[in-house]
Image: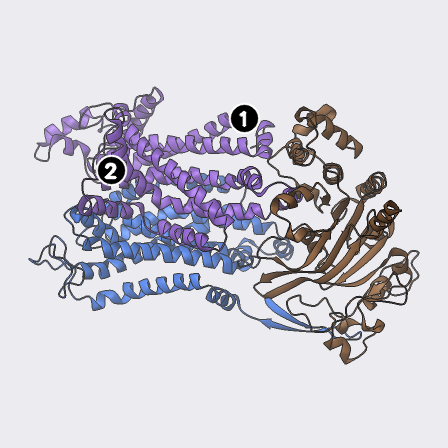
Chain colours: A purple, B blue, C brown
Amino acid sequence: MLRLILSRLALAVPVLVCVSIVAFILLRLAPGDPAQLQAGLEASPDVVAAVRHELALDQPWPVQYLTWAGRVIHGDLGVSYSTRQPVTLLIGQRLPVTAQISITALILIVAIGVPLGILSALHKDRVIDQTVRVVSLFGISVPNFVIGIVLVLLFGWYFPGIMPYEGFVPLGTDALASLKTTALPSLALALAQVGIVARLTRSSMLEVINQEYITAARAFGVSEREIIWRDALRNAMLPVLTVLGIIAGFLLGGSVVIESVFGVAGLGRLLIESFASRDYPIAIGVMLFIAVVFVVVNLIVDVLYGVINPRIRSGYESGEG
Amino acid sequence: MSQAKADTTRGSAPPTVELVSRSLGAQVFFRLARQPVSMFGMAGVLLLVSIALLGPLVAPYDPAALSPERLRPPSTAHLMGTENFGRDVFSRFLFGTRVSMFVGLGAVALGLTAGTLLGMTAGLRAGRVWDTLIMRGMDVVLAFPLLVLVPVLAGILQTKTIQIGPLGLNSIALVGLAIGVVSTPVFARVARASVLAEVREDYIMAARSFGAGTGDLLFGNLWPNIQAPLIVQAAFSLAIAIAAEAAVSFLGLGVQPPDSSWGNMLADARRFVISGAWWLVVCPAAGIALAVLSFNLLGDALRDALDPRVERR
Amino acid sequence: MPWIRELNDVEQSPLLDVRGLTTRFPSDRGMVHAVEDVSFCIRPGEAVGLVGESGSGKSTVLRSLLGLINPPGRIVSGAVMFRGRDLRTLGEHDLRRVRGGQIGLILQDPVNAFNPSLTIGDQLRRILRLHRPGLPAGGYDREISRMLARVGVDTAGGSKLNQYAFNYSQGQLQRVMIAAACLGGEPSLVLADEPTTSLDVTIEAQVLQLLRDLRGELGLALLLVTHNLALVAELCDRVLVMYAGRLVEDSDVYSMFESPKHPYTRQLLRSLPRFPASGARLESMPGSVPDLTALPPGCSFAPRCEQYLGAICDTVCPSLLATRTTDQRAACHLYA
């Protein structure tokens, strides 16, 4: 198992390096001169040149990249062009916000989606199944930010005062208020993805329920309840687990937009703002951070998959995988 | 494929068998036609395509025409009201449908072509240099969350209006290009996997033994058999591409005003929704929902219809 | 003396009495009549073979007995009398006690019969927990090891119980399945659905021997579904022949091979290759198996029957009738 983790991490490094190089190049290709933006649009060329030198933007690109990469290995992501604050500090400030919303959304998705999917599978083609399928379909079709805008309309105009539709309060400051500010953004994120999980759980359960070993268990007198909880669910959850890795990706991407809808100062907003102000260190730092999170999440999913499916686990242990 | 009708007879004469043969397209259509859900998908797509083609011709107003009637709710003069510059929302929606559909279709066309070529090449050279290079490249593209890569790409190319012959690429085309790039890896993976699966089949070995070269293999033998999963993926990618354009334009990084798209109409909507301008949300939201839903349904239906082994439930 | 009369009654009343069993599956092409009006009996300790081609309905009959038909398929009508109680009317709680406890089931493909995510030990312990209430909880593993040893599977002191199905060989798994079915509870009837079809020939012989031994030891009745007539000849006392969802012949095994009564059985036996090869051409039956969604009103075998009698065969479906030999019944107008 340990070997698996290490080998996956080793494979991830070249991909991360490529990602950083591509991001580096793309940012510098974009029109707009950060030095100009920082110096001010009316500044004289001399001032701009001085700023450019200060930000080390007059160096050739490969040199810039290697200096940056060298610092990254020591855990230093550089400083913001505009505020001179360390990028790591900024990420550290904004990360809990995004994390809180994303994790709440993930919990909501699993807590709502999986039971709905199971119910749907067990009562196939009856009213509850049709309803869940239709609602899931709509959930998948309407993008999360559209749901978000509708929620803002509801709670900002029609029913004001019940739920905050803007801003964010960290957990540390005021737990209850924090939960309230988390509610709508997480809900918007979650509702868009619940459908996927419900549908997948449903089809996975249906497939498992028709397997011979389920019939065999029944033939030996095992109760329906135990069959569902012990035999079917275990095997049905495997595909759902892999999807959760992908969903985590969507949640990260989705939070970029949702944070704009709800005026939340999170990681996504930080990224978008850094594009606008051509604040390269922040842009690259955040992109790298997101890529790392992706890798870690997928790794966790693989490990969990191995834990649940014994055949894969022994494959891991004997050095395959 | 064919359907056989057997006539079992008394005595020792072998049964007579009639073969009723239908082309693949006809078979697919008939299978699709039996499912009401897939008909809804097809109807939705047709409706959107019609609006995209004909809508701008019947729009009551010029979508860029400013007027002093700012942020008015729906009325007989303005079916879906006006936005904050006095422009007619309904007309903007009709033009915006054309933009959003164009971006989506263009992006998927690009991704499909590029991805298929790359994927097929990788599949045929499986395990060797080209395969690894291509697929690692796809991994790098995939490592970027969509909403990061598209604005970056669209942002770069944006002001450098690229002239290719008579075509000047504006923000619309560039967003399409960016989403196309992001869609490529999926198609590459599907194409490669299909090629790998087919290459093991005996008919490929037979073709090789008759002296078929790579070109023959690719287009003569493999292509007909890997079409199906690619077509299905195209439907799903269309749904994703349209949603992606909406999100990117919503953030202000995609289609720029005065052009309207579903996404940037929603950006306006967000700003004014807290003052109760609900009419700004309805049309673009409905457009996106209908498009994504229809393409998803179509994808589901195509997947069932094109797989000869699936029994419909 | 009353107790002698009781003994006689026990001898004569069948262990399993199936009456008019009908099971259908709705499908896109129409309603599939998998099992139509099937009736037969099994006496205590008797081994009965249920034979037929693929699609004749024999496996469906087996699963219908224990109510194991998955929706949208349904048992449409019929009674399954086991020890005097109709299994179809039992509540879930009672039915679960019968399943595995009084009637055992051996499935065709042992690899698929076990949950890949649970250890073999867990699955066997669960069976014991359900059907052996007398055992102390700590004694399960010992009992399981004993059971498996009896069928020839070595548990290496119990450690193999913590492994999963994919760690066992096919032959081992089938033996485990047999142990679970025959020794898990205290069954008086074992249903076997093609128990050796997916096994290698060498293992097949061992498994057959095992079944024979267990039957002898425990006095089990056996309903063996197979398309392999040789198996039937080896193991069974009586044979039921199915065609297109209906029972066409019910006879004791010797009589069936010596003088089959139903035209289908006759043509079937004639098409078997014989050793030593006589040089004569193998006969095959003309035509093909009818479509189960569109069965003719009369006898389903009529289109291929060599002894076709005329219009009556096409319009009236024959029921199982006694032939001149009392132990054989055939569904054919020849015997009307």
Report how far apart the C-alphas of labels 2 and 1 lie in the structure.
38 Å
Residue C231 locus on image (x, y percent): 83, 50
- Mark 2 vs 1, N-terminal side: 1
Towards the viewer: C289 or B45:
C289
The C terminus of chain A, quarter of image: top right
**Chain of the residue on which disc 1 is drawn:** A
Q: Mark 2 lies on which chain?
A: A
Q: Nearer the viewer, residue B58 or C288?
A: C288
Residue that extends furthest to the top in the rendered view of this protein: A74
Image spot of residue A118 (x, y percent): 48, 45
Examine the rendered structure and indicate whether residue C105 appears above or below residue B226: above
Write the residue at 14% across / 26% down: A50
> Which three-letter amino acid code belongs to the residue tagged 2?
Ile
Q: What residue type is labelled 1?
A: Met
Which residue corresponds to the image point at 13% horizontal and 65% vertical from the top-left?
A: B77
* A124 up-or-down from C110: above or below: below
For the residues beneath circles 2 and 1, the answer to whether they share a chain is: yes
Asked whether, in this view, residue B295 is left or right of residue C274, the answer is left
Q: What element carries label 2?
A: helix
Q: Which mark is residue A1?
A: 1
Discs 2/1, front: 1
Q: Name the residue under label 2.
A: A272
| Quarter of the N terminus of chain A within the rendering | top right
Label 1: few (<14), some or many (≥20) within 10 Å? some
User: Along the line of sight, which residue is nearer the eye, A179 or B161?
Assistant: A179
Q: With B66 as the anchor, is B134 left or right in this view?
A: right
In this view, A113 is above or below C244: above
Q: In which quarter of the image is residue B89?
A: bottom left
| Residue drawn at point x = 79 percent, y = 66 percent | C320
Q: Is residue B1 left or right of residue A249?
A: right
